[in-house]
Each structure stands twice: as C-alpha cells, then as structure tokens.
Amino acid sequence: MRKLLCPQCKVSALYVKNAQGERRSVYVTDDYRVVPRNEGESLEGFDLDTVYCMGCSWSGSPRRLVLR
C-alpha cells in the first residue's frame, strides 16, 4: 500500500470535511481508499468525494491524486 500525493505540492497530508465543517486528517491509498490518519477514528458523516491538501490550496477528487 502506497499513499497518494497532492498533484500540486506532492504531500500526502490531506483532510476531509463533514456538513458541520469539522475536519478529519486522512490519507489516500493507491487503490483510492480514504483512510483516517489516527487509528480508531471514524469517517462516518464525512464527504469522501472531496479531499483537501494541508500543504497548499488544492482540493478535488481522490482519483486526481498522484503517486509521485
């Protein structure tokens, strides 16, 4: 399993948001699964169709992330 990277700044530090605007730190695997960074956290109620980069202003679909 490899972590996918932001296509703009090449970091793997990403987050997702829920309807209340809360953020959850995640990474995306090379098979496009969105996984919480902290073990035991749930992603229930979070929008997994859009991920946000912590390193720059990029946001988009997990399928737009890159390997390198």
Image: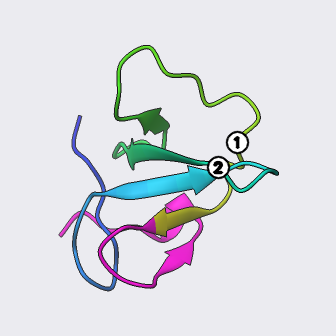
| Amino acid of disc 2 | Glu
| Residue 3, label in figure | none
In the image, residue 68 sits, relative to residue 45, either above or below, namely: below
29 to the left or right of 12: right
| Amino acid of disc 1 | Phe
Of pointers 2 and 1, the one earlier in the residue sequence: 2
In the image, residue 61 sits, relative to residue 16, either above or below, namely: below
Image quarter (top left, top right, bottom left or bottom right) of the N terminus: top left
- Which residue corresponds to the image point at 36% horizontal and 42% vertical from the top-left? 29
- Which residue corresponds to the image point at 34% horizontal and 35% vertical from the top-left? 37
Q: Position of residue 23 (x, y in %)?
A: 56, 50
Q: Position of residue 4 (x, y in %)?
A: 30, 56
Q: Between residues 38 and 5, which one lies in front from this camera angle?
A: 38
Q: Position of residue 58 (x, y in %)?
A: 46, 82
Q: Between residues 10 and 23, which one lies in front from this camera angle?
A: 23
Image quadrant assignment for residue 7: bottom left
Calculate the distance from the C-alpha at mark 2 to the C-alpha at mark 1: 9 Å
Q: Is residue 57 magenta?
A: yes
- Which residue corresponds to the image point at 36% horizontal and 18% vertical from the top-left? 39
Q: How is the image coloured?
A: rainbow
Bounds of the magenta segment: 53-68
| Residue 46, label in figure | 1
Pointer 2 residue? 22
Secondary structure beneath dot 1 equals loop
11 to the left or right of 51: left
Q: Position of residue 47 (x, y in %)?
A: 72, 49
Image quadrant assignment for residue 13: bottom left
Q: What predominant SS class does the magenta segment belong to?
A: loop
Residue count near mark 1 (Cα–Cα under 10 Å), binned few <14, some 14–19, many ≥20: some
- Which residue corresponds to the image point at 22% horizontal and 74% vertical from the top-left? 10
Q: Is residue 12 magenta?
A: no
The mark closer to the camera, 2 or 1, is 2
